[in-house]
Image (cartoon, rainbow, N blue to C red):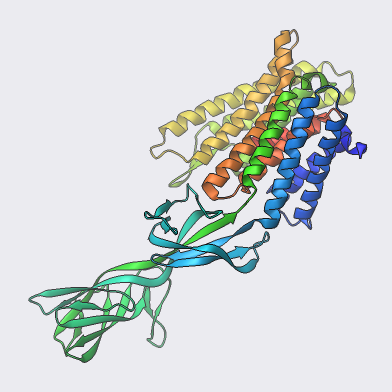
């Protein structure tokens, strides 16, 4: 059991767990039995922390707090995995249901599961739903940005869908001198003077097939039409109305012209349903892990050491080289850069040139530093490599500044994802600039100390970010098992792996920095 606590083994377990957890890798098809493999790796990591806590001499409090948090977190995740439920609930306005369609982890339907109470939809307005719960006098608004909790379940992410039916139609009947209007609904005829008008058949997107038979091309109300049954003094008549052709549908027996004035399509809302009974306990465990890591910060600077003084610069430069091709789907490789807007992708003139030049400079600087490291005595390459990386910082900074100016001048603005992508590149540039500054010859002692603390603080920030995204997922999406939270948790695991004093520190730090910055890109 003590072998698990060795830095090399522990780092490998954390890195493997991060790969299994990351949505871009762990949920892929390359890893059979991914949930079981991930659970086994996390269990090994928890056991390793427990062994370290029992054998710790220095920093025993921090080790015990971190181990206790990991045990609580792992147990909570396991409980939610066994006793949690996830699925979808479909409701139309005025409809109530006491069960939902449960789904497995692979998206396979598991059938209907009872809620234990009835939930109804009073209104469906776009993607907003007014939910009615037992004992509630006022309906609760459910929106895409806010989940609603009741009875141990969370309801979230409503999505409106058109059923192809109509909840209400407004029909007019005119004899040329006066016009009568009636509102009708399926199963609920309307009255217009001495007429009783009922809906017989509704076509949201009316068309005629090759045999001249009516059908609907889609469920969307693009060309609504209806077949009506009109009754006057016990005598039934049939009338056809098409909204695109008002006033031309005449029923000779009645001497009236019928028109379809407006329709109210029937819409349903598909609502995500989640039950995670141990979510609060998982939050407590995650906070304990963060607290234990924070308590150990005073010990980490003495333990986290890199043999090559240029290793942090090389890691930061390589990160910038790998991040730049990711933004805007690799457009930087073609000397271009753009941001998505309402009208589509908007190229930012000049930005791609600066970022492309920064990519070339960073790649050249990294290759020079790698050549120096391989040669062993290639000190002449060190100043040139650092100069090239410094030039990359200046060029990328100029490109980002120009991008900010261009984005600010756009009339419609851009979405938050574009700003986040620019922030990811800015973060990579800032890390490279800080690494160059902290490792320059004659750097003040406090600067070197800050450079030593950078990795532990980044790992702590990754843990805090994972907690924040999980809490945001519960409040917004009804579950902490969101892709964003999983990505941040994978980055946090890589950060903990990078803190271990064992072999290959550069690749581990590079993987952590990439995973952290890729959250923005």
- The answer to which quarter of the image holds residue 133 is bottom left
Where is residue 62 shown, x and y percent of the image?
A: 76, 27
| Whether residue 107 is situated above or below residue 217 in the rendered picture | above
Residue at left offset 85%, top offset 21%? 307
Outermost residue on the front side: it is 135
In the shown orientation, is residue 182 left or right of residue 324? left
In the shown orientation, is residue 101 left or right of residue 459? left
Residue at left offset 78%, top offset 54%? 36
- Nearer-the-camera pick, 170 or 373: 170
Where is residue 303 shown, x and y percent of the image?
A: 82, 22
Where is residue 455 shown, x and y percent of the image?
A: 73, 25
Considering the image in quadrants, where does the N terminus appear? top right
- The answer to which quarter of the image holds residue 391 is top right
Where is residue 411 shown, x and y percent of the image?
A: 38, 37
Residue at left offset 78%, top offset 22%? 300
Asked whether the viewer can see residue 475, the reply is yes
| Whether residue 117 is situated above or below residue 170 in the rendered picture | above
Outermost residue on the left side: it is 177
Asked whether the viewer can see residue 511, the reply is no
- Total marks shown come to 0
In the shown orientation, is residue 201 left or right of residue 388? left
- The answer to which quarter of the image holds residue 212 is bottom left
């Amino acid at each position: 059991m003590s072998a698990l606590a060795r830095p090399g083994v522990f780092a490998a377990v954390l890195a493997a767990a991060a790969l299994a957890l990351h949505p871009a890798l762990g949920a892929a098809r390359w890893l059979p039995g991914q949930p079981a493999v991930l659970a086994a790796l996390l269990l090994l990591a928890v056991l390793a922390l427990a062994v370290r806590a029992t054998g710790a001499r220095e920093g025993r409090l921090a080790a015990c707090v971190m181990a206790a948090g990991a045990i609580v977190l792992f147990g909570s995740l396991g409980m939610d995995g066994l006793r949690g439920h996830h699925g979808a609930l479909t409701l139309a306005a005025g409809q109530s249901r006491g069960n939902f369609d449960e789904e497995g982890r692979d998206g396979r339907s598991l059938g209907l599961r009872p809620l234990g109470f009835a939930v109804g939809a009073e209104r469906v307005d776009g993607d907003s739903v007014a939910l009615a719960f037992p004992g509630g006098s006022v309906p609760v608004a459910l929106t895409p940005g806010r989940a609603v909790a009741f009875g141990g379940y969370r309801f979230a992410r409503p999505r409106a869908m058109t059923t192809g039916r109509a909840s209400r139609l407004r029909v007019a009947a005119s004899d040329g001198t006066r016009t009568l209007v009636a509102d009708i609904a399926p199963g609920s005829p309307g009255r217009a003077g001495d007429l009783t008008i009922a809906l017989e058949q509704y076509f949201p997107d009316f068309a005629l097939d090759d045999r001249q038979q009516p059908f609907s091309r889609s469920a969307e109300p693009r060309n609504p039409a209806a077949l009506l049954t009109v009754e006057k003094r016990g005598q039934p008549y049939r009338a056809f109305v098409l909204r695109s052709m008002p006033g031309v549908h005449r029923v000779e027996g009645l001497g009236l012209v019928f028109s379809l004035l407006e329709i109210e399509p029937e819409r349903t809302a598909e609502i995500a349903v989640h039950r995670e009974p141990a979510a609060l306990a998982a939050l407590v465990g995650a906070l304990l892990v963060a607290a234990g890591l924070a308590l150990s910060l005073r010990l980490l600077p003495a333990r986290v050491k890199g043999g090559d003084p240029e290793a942090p610069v090389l890691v930061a430069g390589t990160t910038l080289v790998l991040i730049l091709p990711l933004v805007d789907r690799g457009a930087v490789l073609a000397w271009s850069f753009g941001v998505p807007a309402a009208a589509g992708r908007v190229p930012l003139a000049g930005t791609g040139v600066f970022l492309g030049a920064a990519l070339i400079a960073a790649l050249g600087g990294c290759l020079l530093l790698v050549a120096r490291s391989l040669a062993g005595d290639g000190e002449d390459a060190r100043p040139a490599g650092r100069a090239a990386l410094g030039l990359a910082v200046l060029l990328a900074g100029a490109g980002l500044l120009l991008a900010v100016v261009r984005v600010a001048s756009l009339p419609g603005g851009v979405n938050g994802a574009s700003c986040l992508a620019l922030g990811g590149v800015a973060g990579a540039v800032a890390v490279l600039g800080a690494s160059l500054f902290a490792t320059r010859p004659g750097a003040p002692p406090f600067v070197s100390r800050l450079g030593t603390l950078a990795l532990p603080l980044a790992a702590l920030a990754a843990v805090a970010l994972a907690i924040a995204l999980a809490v945001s997922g519960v409040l917004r999406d009804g579950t902490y098992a969101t892709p964003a939270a999983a990505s941040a948790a994978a980055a946090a695991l890589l950060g903990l792996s990078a803190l271990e004093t064992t072999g290959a520190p550069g690749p581990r730090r590079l993987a952590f920095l990439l995973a952290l910055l890729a959250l923005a890109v």
